[in-house]
Image (tube, grey):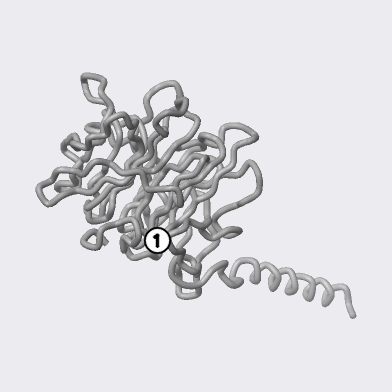
Amino acid sequence: MSQTKKNILWLVACLWVGSIQVFGKPFAVGPYLGKIPPGPIPKVFAPGLICDMRPHQGEAWGTFSADGNTFCFSRSGYVYITENTNQGWTTPKRIESIPYMSACCCLSPDANSIYFNYSYDPSKRYSLRRCMRTSQGWSLQQELGPPFSLAFGGFSLAADNSIYFWGWDKAKLGGFWVAPFVNNTWPRAIKIPVEKGNLRGHHPGIAPDKSFLVFYSVKPGVPRGTETNLYLTLRRADGTWTKPQNMGPKINTRYYEWGARISPDKKYMFFTRANGWGMNSSSDTGDIYWVELKKYLPESYR
């Protein structure tokens, strides 16, 4: 065989192998990345696909779009997205325009925006920002500004794009706030009257229809920052909220539970369980868990 023919065959073989890598089978097929839904006991979400269960790895803030066909999450300080196509779910891709160590990423219901907190100086207040989907990919980050100057911690979005967040008011009192989405913007923030008592409520995870909210707090009676639990509060018809209730020992353990997100159909809750706070040291590791909410909600809220 001539050297020219050998070179042609070698080139064809390389292109064929490359096409397998680019156009090969997706990594998962079916709703919720093809995973069998959990019951009332939480289990790791999509181990090996979304969650890297090796030591010193961490995933958080898992959020599905309203149609369930896009999933956004944080992995070891970066933000990733995977989408359900006719052939199945795509391999998670990092959003290049979102910087390292951005906190609390959250996907918009229509999957066209990704929101996150970021600060160039971690000792200062985080600012709420977003990247938007364009025909050329994801846009550069944009700071949302007021009324989110109040925002200090985690947040989540309802189905109508209202943003629920934790922040400080002028009296330096921490609390939960909601910024209603009106005329394609957020003109003001309203404090949510959740009576937390001795709980230090943070990172509100709002239900799509705004009927209930899950947040984390340091467990009463333990040193600050050593154990966190998830609490549930229900919104009554008159707009008031029930006294927050600990979600119980099946969800809350001796580890850290935080970062609740509610699925679009309200059937499941996603949250992070970690053995350290923030995966900041070589000993910290955490994974996204999911759990069926049927047992934890009154029938009228399901």
Residue 26 visible from this viewpoint: yes
Residue 189 visible from this viewpoint: no
Looking at the image, residue 135 sits to the left or right of residue 213; the answer is right
Percent x, y of residue 94:
52, 50
Percent x, y of residue 9:
79, 76
The amino acid beneath tag 1 is Glu
**Quarter in which the N terminus is drawn:** bottom right
Q: Residue furthest top?
A: 171
**Quarter in which the C terminus is drawn:** bottom left
Mark 1 residue element: strand
Q: Which residue, given by chain and number where applicable, does mark 1 sit on? A: 292
Q: Residue at x 61, y 58 (%)?
A: 48
Q: Residue furthest bottom?
A: 1
Frontmost residue, 139 versus 170: 170
How crowded is the residue under tag 1: few (<14 C-alpha within 10 Å), some, or many (20+)?
many
Percent x, y of residue 110:
31, 58
Looking at the image, residue 232 sits to the left or right of residue 226; the answer is left
Q: Is residue 33 above or below residue 234?
A: below
Q: Quadrant of residue 186?
A: top left
Count of numbered badges drawn on the protein: 1
Q: Residue at x 54, y 68 (%)?
A: 28
Q: Residue at x 65, y 66 (%)?
A: 21
Q: Quadrant of residue 105?
A: top left
